[in-house]
Amino acid sequence: MKNKEILQQALAARKEEIFGYQINIDNYRLAIPLAEADPELKEFSDQLKSLLASEILEQKKAAVILKVLQIQLGE
């Protein structure tokens, strides 16, 4: 496999990864207020907030690598 083909596959995989993070981010943002509305779900709400922060950070990291791949491919 040639270098460009490998980079293109990595680029596609990174885009999919970022999209996956975005799905989780959107879900957590919608779930947090619903969980906060129920006092019995305080711990769950806190977990969702932690997961949201983690997903945002991981998405940012993946975006950096995506940019690196785009630079390497001349995009």
Image (spheres, helix red, strand yellow):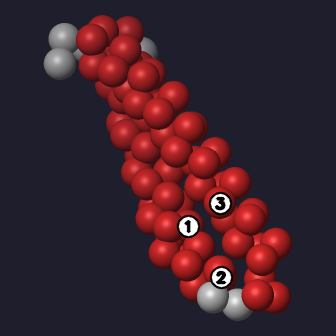
| Residue type of the residue flagged with mark 3 | Lys
Task: Tell me: residue 67, above or below residue 2.
Answer: below
Q: How many neighbours does mark 1 have within 10 angstroms: few (below 14), some (14-19), or many (20 or more)? A: many
Mark 2 closeness class: few <14, some 14–19, many ≥20 residues within 10 Å: some
- Residue 22 in picture, x, y percent from top left: 43, 54
Say whether disc 1 or disc 2 marks the residue closer to the N-terminus: 1
At 77% across and 83% down in the image, what residue appears?
A: 41
Q: Of the numbered discs in the image, which one, if any, rests on residue 50?
A: none
Disc 3 to disc 1: CB gap under 8 Å:
yes
Q: Position of residue 36 (x, y in %)?
A: 65, 80
- Earlier in the chain: of badge 2 and badge 3, it is 2
Q: Which mark is residue 49?
A: 3
Q: Is residue 18 visible?
A: yes
The answer to whether residue 75 is above or below residue 17 is above
Image location of residue 37, percent across then percent down: 63, 88
Q: Secondary structure at mark 2?
A: helix
Disc 2 + disc 3, Cβ < 8 Å: no
- Give amino acid for label 2: Ala
Residue in the picture at 17% in, 18% down: 75
Label 2 sits on residue: 35
Q: Give how far apart the Cα atoms at labels 3 and 1 are.
A: 7 Å
* Residue at mark 1: 28
Where disc 1 sits, the SS reads helix
Camera-nearest residue between 61 and 39: 39
Q: Secondary structure at mark 3?
A: helix
